[in-house]
Image (spheres, coloured by chain):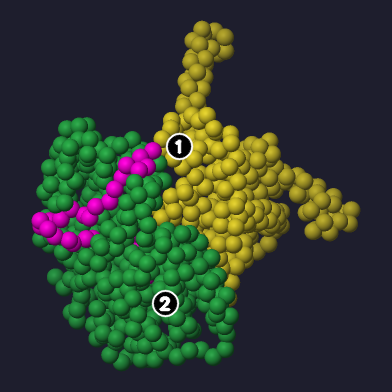
Amino acid sequence: MRAHYGKATAAFAMVSALTLAGCAGGGGDSTAGGEGGSSCEPSSGPVDLTFTTWVPGMDKVVDLWNEENPDIQVKVQTGPNGNSGTYQNFFNQLQAGNAPDLGQIEYDALPNFRVQDGLENIAACENVSDAEDQFVDWTWGQVTFGEDDAVYAVPQDSGPMAMFYRKDLFEQAGIEVPTTWEEYAAAAEEIKAQGSYITNFPRGDVNWFAGNVWQAGGQWFSNDDEGWDVNLTGEESEQVANYWQDLLEKDQVSTLPSFSDEWNASFNEGDQWTWISAVWGASTLATGAPDTSGKWAVAPMPQWEDGGTAAGNWGGSSTAVLKGSDHPYEAAQFALWLNTDPEALALANELGGLYPAAKSATDLEAFSGGVEYFGGQKIYDVFAEASSNVDPNFTWGPTMTQTYTDVSDGFGKAIGGEGTLMDALTAGEEATVESLKSQSIPVKE
Amino acid sequence: MRRGDSPRGPRHSIMSRTGAMLIMGVFTLYFLTPIWWLLVSSTKTGGQITGTAPLWFTMESIPTFFSNIGRLFTYSDGVFGRWLLNSAIYAGLGALLGTIIAAMCGYALAKYEFKGREAIFNIVLSGVLVPATALALPLFLIFSEVKLTNTLWAVFLPSLVSPFGVYLARIYAAASVPGELLEAARLDGSGEIRTFFTVSTRLMAPALVTIFLFQFVAIWNNFFLPLIMLRDQTLFPVTLGLYAWNSQISQIPELRVLVIVGALVSIVPLIAAFLALQRFWSSGLGAGSVK
């Protein structure tokens, strides 16, 4: 894969690594546009922008903008979701110099684009830096990377995690709904005794596992002047890994491939009593397990400490202005509108199922009422609460696709009885360090 | 072994025939089961796919099937119909023009003596070895230079070349178009181009149908090139469109049914093309393999 990029990208990686370290000191005058958030001026005359996204129905949302802004017309282009091809296309297009003005990028892929110098810093564009207060705290950290005077994207949606559970089954069995992981493990044993599983361990969804580490207060990546620190095997990761390893060894969790037919069926038939998942999981359940409508409820994630409130996050994406855009000012204004305007947010939720990263989401009608599938419970209150309890300092690495693949391979082996989840994380960490080095991204060891 | 004087002969043949039939039967089942599943699943609603027997119909299969088809063609402003049309253009026109180019090229290589003929043929032949996927990214960069990415041409133009078609056309032209016939045509005053279209293409017809089918299937199923080249979903071929939908299922679970029904609909033109051109197909294949 790397061979395709050739010299240009190697140079990119080097240059951007330096910029990362130097926090946009002053160089980079050879590229078009003002690097380092120095200036961001409106263009004169009418502007046409292109926006690549894979959220269904986004074209309808953008129509609202186009009606109100005849001088800034946005054209929506769609494709498969990021890791299924769109990110690779962005990189190809960045290299060819014909990337779209705006692109949807998930939080866990943003650092990759940052390191490859694929993002415009829009901090100096009007209203952008001031918008910080309008977004859930942790999402803002994802788009600034903690750098000063830097905003590389506008948060779009998020996936705060909670616990979906079968209220009816817990009541019938007389088992208390677990509030801590310890109680959760105890419940798992009782549920197994009744011939069901408390949940499914998703071997392929490493970002789900990361969400759990996130909740526990762990950090997989961090970076400073000297480079990246990769730590998939920290104390919290070990805690989470050992916890699930134990449940796996006792066969108290199933190991079906997530989102498959059998997985859906096991929920539909009541073989699964809980699902630790993100807010968007509500529609996954409703579609995949229609026969269990009205029997589900949502509670906060089980806690490591009694009385804790920490939550993790699984998924979510941002709207980024890609490097080389001729109109970063207009693109930034559109990105802000898209992710804060109440009408736009409501429509994006209705058509695309997005749970907005904007704090004002809680005021939207779609998120204020009870949900029939969950017996009329106001589930979005639980998720809004969870969202405010997500650690804002969690950082993704620049090569998450590779990290996910390596860890997921290891998880598969661990489930087959070869090694443990912790071994998978150790191997994933080594592979990640190798991968960073091979891209000339500085790593601390 | 002489025929007739050993009783083991015919029995052996019956046994081996049964064995062969058995193996073919197993493989037929193996290849047809997914299509059967596709057919059955397209008659179900999202919930029924997981909740009912995977390989058999439900009571409401027929109405559900039609309502699924209706939703498929109306979802997102009927973009699926557009994708089918695009695929038909890319594959139909692309295969037609590609076949003519390959036929002319192979014919010229077979029937004319000129300097560097073998060199050209060998270079074209080596193109067979390079997978189309490996060429997609270089093609993207080239098309970016001339600002043709995200246009119909970005998918259409690369679809016109078929090194394997040139190879097949050459082999077949060498075997089926006698040089004497061309001499006769020349003596009668027919130009080279006219001879090619009126005499030679008729003799090469089975090979041309084979090349057409190969190209048609290759372009119809080509997925990677459009994935890299196209951003505007109104230009997508049906393969890429379905892939894009499929990648969104975790966000919009209702797309699952549409992907299944869409996959079923998208193979119908392929089956139709095969059934219509099948009889030419076998003779063409045979001719290519014997030389």
- A266 within the magenta span: no
Question: Label 1 sits on what residue type?
Answer: Gln
Q: In which chain is the residue bearing label 1?
A: B
Q: Residue at x 56, y 75 (%)?
A: A66
Magenta segment boundaries in residue numbering: A291-318
- Say what secondary structure mark 2 lies in: helix
Q: In which chain is the residue bearing label 2?
A: A
B272 vs A72, left or right, is right
Numbered circle sitting on residue A336: 2
Q: Residue at x 31, y 66 (%)?
A: A108
Question: Label 2 sits on what residue type?
Answer: Leu
Image quadrant assignment for residue A400: bottom left
Please indicate, yes or no, whether residue A101 appears anywhere in the rendered image: yes
- The residue lying toward the viewer, choosing from A4 and A45, is A45
The percent coordinates of residue B195 (x first, y second) are 81, 54
Q: Residues within 10 Å of mark 2 (few under 14, many from 20)?
A: some
Image quadrant assignment for residue B265: top right
The percent coordinates of residue B243 (x first, y second) are 48, 53
A352 vs B77, left or right, is left
- Say what secondary structure mark 1 lies in: helix
Q: Which chain is in green here?
A: A
Q: Residue furthest right?
A: B188
Colour chain B appears in? yellow
B46 vs B104, left or right, is left
- The residue lying toward the viewer, choosing from B90 and A307, is A307
The percent coordinates of residue B88 (x first, y second) are 65, 53
The percent coordinates of residue A107 (x first, y second) are 32, 67
**Residue where numbered disc 1 is placed:** B48
- The residue lying toward the viewer, choosing from B96 and A98, is A98
- A304 within the magenta span: yes
